[in-house]
Amino acid sequence: VPTPERTTIDQIVLAGRELLEQGGLTSLTMQAVATRVGVRAPSLYKRVRDRDALVTLVAEASIDDLRERLVAAVGDSGDPGEALIRLARALRVFAHERPAAFALTFGSGPAGVVVKPESYRRASAPVLDVAARLAGDRTALDAARLITAWANGFIMMELTGAFQLGGDVDRAFEWGVQRLVEAIRS
Amino acid sequence: VPTPERTTIDQIVLAGRELLEQGGLTSLTMQAVATRVGVRAPSLYKRVRDRDALVTLVAEASIDDLRERLVAAVGDSGDPGEALIRLARALRVFAHERPAAFALTFGSGPAGVVVKPESYRRASAPVLDVAARLAGDRTALDAARLITAWANGFIMMELTGAFQLGGDVDRAFEWGVQRLVEAIRS
DNA sequence: ACCTGAACACCGTTCAAGT
DNA sequence: ACCTGAACACCGTTCAAGT
């Protein structure tokens, strides 16, 4: 006798994202997700292989959110140097608003959580576009990686508390982007 | 009636480090540490407040290892640009040899794991020295953060698998350091 | 076809009882 | 003073039994 579905994969992922944001990765448990979608924990295994798979879906959804923000940040653009700076700032705003999601997607989470390559590729497309306009097609990839690596590293250290020598962190961020854009331009 | 100590905090931290390296953070459990030092799990709580405290000690020990490597990498130095490149490479070698330790100390682990500020400060001292010789005292801090953030971000993305556009990753790393050293020099 | 309770093997942590 | 077994409240996951 068939039974109507009492929840959906989308609801489950959404619940996971909310839990991640509210209490970090540790509070994203199968049981918490289950109660949130109005079902018992074992039922989740009809839609998801295991917890790692669910966490991976949550990470991928976060990356996609970030991608939208990056696209919006570029806008209709103008100067590619300015656009690159706006991209870096958008990434930082995202990380400050959703630190757990940022840490999950860029700082390695549990070993079993492996994000689809395509997710990363799609999110990095806007950066790559702007980098190409700034540095030319030939060095676009290197340039995109240079600024992305720096921004991710800066933000991660900021969130982790690894910046311990004082100084204005906001200013340091702006100083860094400027410097990188100049370096890429030449 | 007093009883002889059957283990020490050093043994415990060492066991934690070994477990971290072999199976990642998830396999660093109180029970696994306990069996490794020849004791039952509850006994660990005589030397350590809880698991987070132990993980923090493990992280700090790893940072201290890294610090030694950085000091060795600078050597008696010579050209500060060259020294900075050697520092970046040493960080990357460390990360490749002990990815779990790197992820734990620079990608944020569990929320309760907060590394002592002094640990970060001590490890960044060699970088700061070289940066000062390269860029002058006034911009040394900014310069040190620029290269540290980039290197950490690059390596983290490398370990996470966030580099999805192909290309030679080793070459990209070398290209990036060169570019940064030039940018800092001017 | 989906959902559930019960069960299993694991966690971290506390605490009274041993020596 | 240290160590332990037993206990508690949690996990993730499986599976037979329900509808």
Image (cartoon, coloured by chain):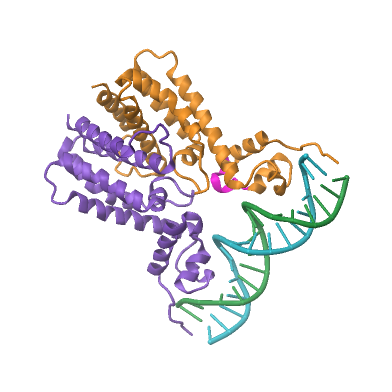
Chain colours: A purple, B orange, C green, D cyan
Quarter of the image with the N terminus of chain B in it:
top right
Please state if A63 lies on the left or on the right of A15 as rendered: left
Look at the image and say whether residue A25 sits in the magenta stretch. no
Is residue B27 in the magenta section? Answer: yes
Q: Is residue B77 above or below residue B6?
A: above
Residue B75 on image: x %, y %: 45, 16
**Tag count:** 0
Q: Which quadrant holds residue B143?
A: top left
Q: Is residue B141 above or below residue A36?
A: above
Q: Is residue A148 left or right of residue A139?
A: right
Q: Give the magenta-colored segment's residue range.
A: B22-29
Residue B63 at x, y = what percent? 51, 32
Q: Position of residue C16 (x, y in %)?
A: 80, 57
Main secondary structure along the magenta-highlighted residues: helix
Instruction: Decide if residue A130 is in sight here.
Output: yes
**Is the C terminus of chain B in the top left, top right, bottom left or bottom right quadrant?**
top left
Residue found at the very far left of the displayed protein = A78
Q: Residue B120 versus residue A79: which sits nearer the camera?
A: B120
Q: Residue furthest front?
A: A167
Residue A131 figure quarter: top left
Image x and y of residue A5, in percent: 43, 78
In this view of the protein, which residue sits in the foreground, A164 or B22? A164
Quick one: B23 or B11, which is closer to the camera?
A: B11
Q: As drawn, is A99 to the left or to the right of A141?
A: right
Instruction: Give me the residue at 53% from left, 38% from top.
Output: B59
Q: Residue at x 44, y 68 (%)?
A: A47
Which residue is drawn at the image coordinates 66% and 38% (left, top)?
B12
Q: Can the viewer see residue A145?
A: no
Q: Name above or below for residue B138 compared with residue B170.
A: above
